């Protein structure tokens, strides 16, 4: 099973995602903001990142994804560029804006709205992980 990092400022969301993923056999680490999330990525190199958009700022998750996907080989995060990101967020329910993965503007593998059914979450996690394995 995979080592997954959940980065979200809502402890209830982190707990529900953790319980769902651990019940399926995954190992889960957690972080509650972008700063601790980036530290956790460097310390533990997860196989998948589940990332919220709105944390300390309304766009913190977007900025994290852009840092991780920076194509500059001298980037501080170049070694983590290939870790898949599943963006799990309530941004669509709180703003009229609509987002989806985009290689230039939102470089994530999948964009999923909260709340999410646990079975649907597991299906999406498995889909992202199997895509990366191919």
Image (cartoon, rainbow, N blue to C red):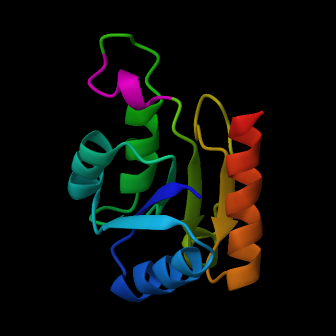
Q: Give the vertical position of 26 relative to 102 (above or below).
A: below
Residue 117 lies, in percent from the top left, at 71, 85
Q: Looking at the image, which is closer to me, 42 or 34? A: 42
Can residue 98 be seen here? The reply is no
Q: Give the vertical position of 39 relative to 68 (above or below).
A: below
Q: Residue at x 40, y 12 (%)?
A: 72
Is 78 colored magenta in this rendering? Answer: yes
Is 79 colored magenta in this rendering? Answer: yes
Q: Residue at x 41, y 34 (%)?
A: 68
Residue 29 lies, in percent from the top left, at 36, 64
Residue 79 lies, in percent from the top left, at 38, 24
> Magenta segment, which residues?
75-81
Direction from residue 20 to residue 40 in the image, left or right: left
- Residue 124 quadrant: bottom right
Can residue 68 be seen here? The reply is yes
Quadrant in which the N terminus is drawn = bottom right
Q: Residue at x 68, y 49 (%)?
A: 129
Q: Give the vertical position of 31 relative to 105 (above or below).
A: below
Q: Looking at the image, which is closer to me, 113 or 127? A: 127
Direction from residue 29 to residue 25 in the image, left or right: right
Q: How many marks?
A: 0
Quadrant in which the C terminus is drawn = top right
Direction from residue 125 to residue 12 in the image, left or right: left
- Residue 119 quadrant: bottom right
Residue that sits furthest to the top in the current view: 73
Residue 115 lies, in percent from the top left, at 63, 83
Q: Residue at x 21, y 52 (%)?
A: 35
């Amino acid at each position: 099973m995979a080592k997954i990092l959940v980065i979200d400022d809502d402890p209830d969301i982190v707990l529900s995602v953790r319980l769902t993923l651990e019940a399926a056999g995954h190992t889960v680490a957690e972080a509650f903001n972008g700063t601790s999330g980036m530290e956790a990525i460097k310390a533990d190199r997860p196989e998948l990142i589940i990332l919220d958009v709105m944390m300390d700022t309304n766009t913190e998750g977007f900025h994290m994804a852009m840092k991780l996907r920076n194509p500059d080989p001298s980037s501080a995060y170049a070694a983590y560029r290939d870790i898949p990101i599943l963006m799990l967020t309530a941004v669509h329910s709180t703003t009229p804006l609509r987002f989806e993965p985009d290689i230039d503007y939102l470089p994530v593998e999948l964009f999923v709205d909260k709340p999410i059914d646990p079975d649907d979450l597991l299906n999406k996690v498995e889909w992202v992980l199997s895509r990366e394995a191919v």
